[in-house]
Amino acid sequence: MRDWAAFVRARLSLPDHRATHEHRVVRELATQLRDAYEDARARGMSETDADDFARHQIGDWDALEAEVRDASRFEASPRLDRIVDRLSTPDARPGRWRTMISGFVADALCGVRAVRARPAFAAAVVLTLALGIGATTALFGVFDALFLRPLPVPAPDRLVELGTVGRRGARAATLTYPNYRALLAAGSTSIDWMATELQRLTVDAGDSVQRRNVEHVTASYFDVLALAPAAGRFFAAGEDTPNAPSLTCVISHALWRTGFSSDPAVVGRTIEIEHHRFVIVGVAPAGYSGLRRGVPADIWVTLANRHLFRLEPMEQRWDYFSAEMSWLGVQGRLRQGASLEQAEAGLQVAAGQIFETVPPATPRRVILLPADRGQLGTVSSLERPLLILAAAGGLVLLVVCSNVAGLLLVGGNRRRREMAIRLALGAPRSRLVRQLLLETLGLALAGGAAGLVLARGAAWILAGWGVDVAGARAVSQGTNLVIGLSLDGRWFGCALLLSIGSALASGLVPALTASRVDVVRAIKGAEVRRGRRRRGFSLNRLLVVAQVAASVTLVAVAGLLLRSAGGLVGTGLLLGGAGALGAGRAVSSWLFGVRPFDPVTLAAVATLLLAAGFAASWLPARRAARVDPLVALRNE
Amino acid sequence: MIPPVAFSAELKKGGMEMLVLSLLEARPRHGYELAKLIETRSGGKLHFALASVYPALLRLENRGHIKGRWVEKPGERSRCFYRLTAEGRKLLADQQETWKAYVAAVHQVMGVDRA
């Protein structure tokens, strides 16, 4: 008898199938052909006739091959996909991941064609999203640079700062030099300590003389931070003593690059700080610019030389190493295996001894504050305004999303016929929703890319505003303020997340609405009249009301931030109001099908604003009325 | 033996999946058995070659309506026996319903035509 498996294998070729699948097809066909042969033999045919009979069961192998390929397109997808598919479209056929990907590609291409067919609409959506995503990304960029980004040192989460708990809560402590020495002498099994102070001094370095930030540090500073020099070395223990043989310093990578053209022979050269000659012993690694946020250090010198820089006449009398002067910020790194709680408990014992032997210049209740982000100091005054701005940015994005959702709703209304034809051709509704969502996602990603460009410019302006706000305080403290912004992966991540979020927030409801059409009516051309009088409160009206309410809230927030610019806000409101009335008719097609003077919408906006105004005045008044006069007077 | 009636290929192909599902309703069967049963039960009027039966089985299996399992029965070779899944059972019920309604409608129309 013939080897039926070899017979099938010689005629059927399925190179694009998995080996196991191909093997199964061959085995099953061979079994059935053998069954046919044996059946023919059982019916009395000769071997040759039975062989002929079985062989002729499959006449056209090419057609069979095509049918097997076609059938395999519907190979069952993973269980989860099938469940999701069944939930969304009961009549949809489960598809393989390949089918899914090709489906996605086909939908994406469909989306591209739809976008190209309406370039003005697409441009409006992209621009709107770009504004929202750009504003929010810019805020994130500045907030990240100031408050979120950890110090560029190994394991920044193990850095701590010595703090105290007083009536105003926990804050970083400043210690006297004897206190710090006593802290070191007490010995800690869980923390390596360092102490710092920042000063702005005149430096003659390279070919320029200018004011630069100089950080006075203990010799342990770079070891505690676990940094490696880009060139030369860091401080040796003997250099942190008042009688060191020579004055040494470490310069920042930025100063090395700009002041010394990254000269590898910079080690051993000298710079002058307030007319004192310092020998450069090393260069800090790229990206590291000291502990202070917003105040990048250019040079590090040892703490023991602090007395060289008593510049003010009054300062000449001060003894920085006495028990009267509290000036040192104290930071440390938790040793391997030590926990914050252990270190803090050990510190209480040590602090008790230290503050009993040395006259206390610091309250006794000491704690450890996380210092992974360095010292916020000057920039902490920006935290609240930036948080308010971030909330405003979120609101802007919400307005933008609702605006885009409105545009998409109107756009979907115009595409009812297209949707109806696709439904009539057998496309499941989930497929239409997916295509519309992909379209929105594409537009949102384009908006995100444009927003990133806008964000770059906006963040620099925002940083300038931040410097204006917090810079005055920095100058009063003898330093300057720099908000270092660098467009990197974190910005891209933020813009990408916002794009995807915006696409979902603005695209989901319009996609669901657009794909829910009455096929027969839509194909016959029964258009839904736009702007017709509708009863009840439609989604479009809701969007308009939400946008107006959010916009007015934004103006109020802007007023809070720019109290001095009240006139500007008023002018903006007047111009905006006049512009809105004038442009209302011109852009009525973009008003989500709601007429510019729709009484229901106007009434709802007025009610909402009245309610917000009432809440905004009543809540603080109620809180103020609860204050006990005696308590208030006692505090005064 | 009654000579096979010349049903069109489209007509046969359209009904094949329903026939396969119906035959599997009672118990699991293998591919050649299904082809033989269709021929026997139709009195030879319906004849499907393996080239038509196997793609239909593959399609139904890949859509999750039937499930094949290789079984070696005592004294027999190993064969792939197909059984109905819950989805297949539901599909069969739907198809039977639709088919009955269609046949009734056709009968009704033809009855009216004759009258």
Image: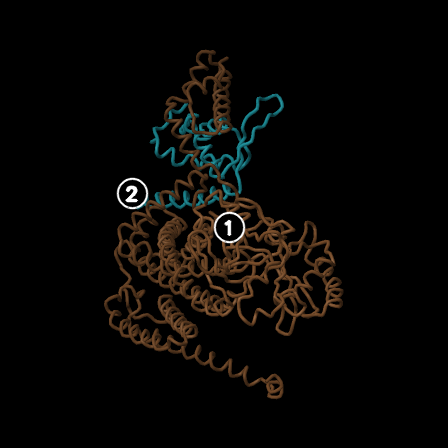
Chain colours: A brown, B cyan
Q: Do the dots labelled 1 and 2 sit on one chain?
A: no
Residue that badge 2 annotates: B114
Which of the two marks, 1 or 2, is nearer to us in this view? 1
Where residue A243 sits: x, y (%)?
64, 55
Placement of A155 over or under A56, stated as above or below: below
The type of residue carrying mark 1 is Thr
Above or below residue A84? Residue A217 is below
Q: Residues within 10 Å of mark 1 (few under 14, many from 20)?
A: some
Q: Residue at left 47%, top 63%?
A: A481
Q: Is residue A184 left or right of residue A26?
A: right
Please state, as top left, top right, bottom left or bottom right, where the C terminus of chain A lies in the image. Answer: bottom right
Would residue A590 appear left or right of A543 to someone viewing this image? left
Spot occupied by residue A58 in the image (x, y as percentages of width and height): 41, 22
Q: Is disc 1 in contact with disc 2, using a CB cutoff of under 8 Å?
A: no
Q: Which residue does the image show at 48% across and 37% down from the upper left?
A: B22
Decide: few, some or many residues near mark 2? Use Cα within 10 Å; few <14, some 14-19, many ≥20.
few
Q: Does dot 1 land on a helix, a strand or a loop?
A: strand
Label 1 belongs to which residue?
A270
Whether residue A432 is visible:
no
- Choose between A160 and A415: the one closer to the eye: A160
Secondary structure beneath dot 2 equals: helix
Percent across and percent down for residue A316 are: 57, 69
Q: Give how far apart the Cα atoms at labels 1 and 2 are.
A: 117 Å
* Placement of B111 over or under A416, stated as above or below: above
Which residue is at the front of the view, A266 or A219? A266
Q: Residue at x 55, y 48 (%)?
A: A281
Residue A593: x, y in percent? 30, 66
Tell me the quarter of the picture where residue A232 sits. Answer: top right
Residue A517 image label:
none
